[in-house]
Amino acid sequence: MVTQKAAGGTTLRVPIEVRFKDVDMMGHVNNAVYLTYFEVARTHYGKALGAAGSPRKMSYVVARAECDFRSPARMDDQLVCLIRVASFGRTSFVFEYVLRDERDGRVVAEGRTVQVMFDYAAGKVRPLDD
């Protein structure tokens, strides 16, 4: 994984392995799998920030997920997911994703998720930490 500073903040580059189970009978990655690839990138982002071991920092729920499919991904593609935090709210933050094939730079999908901080003990939304 590589991090780089971009205009909107830190962008993390996460290699994505296309598994046999990800591919459907048509030979391309099934559309439902793309959100899993975004989840893999989110997990690596949390680890890169040192938040993975902190239940308070990782106590969010995904409230919204969007995916725009640009071109089909196949078993032999060398995928990478670029992820960055696009914005912060009072209780939420937004991740943006670009999934591309490393060999030709082709964009496979673009996505966006909204995470809402959640206090599991109280069972309610909570403000973001500083």
Image: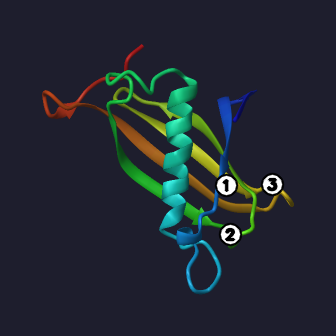
Q: Secondary structure at mark 2?
A: loop
Q: Quadrant of residue 27?
A: bottom right
Residue placed farthest to the bottom in the image? Answer: 26
Residue placed farthest to the top in the image? Answer: 130
Q: Answer yes or no: is residue 95 visible.
A: no
Q: Secondary structure at mark 1?
A: strand
Horizontal and vertical percent position of residue 14: 66, 43
**Amino acid at circle 3:** Glu
Numbered tag placed on residue 73 in the rendering: 2
> Along the line of sight, which residue is nearer the eye, 44 or 109?
44
Distance CA(mark 1)–CA(mark 3): 9 Å
Which is more foreground, mark 1 or mark 3?
3
Compared with 127, 123 (above or below) is below
> Along the line of sight, which residue is nearer the eye, 112 or 19?
19
Q: Secondary structure at mark 3?
A: loop
> Which quarter of the image is occupied by the C terminus?
top left
Distance CA(mark 3)–CA(mark 2): 12 Å
Compared with 123, 110 (above or below) is below
Distance CA(mark 2)–CA(mark 1): 10 Å
> Along the line of sight, which residue is nearer the eye, 93 or 44?
44
Which residue was labeled with disc 3?
102
Which residue was labeled with disc 1?
99
**Amino acid at circle 2:** Ala
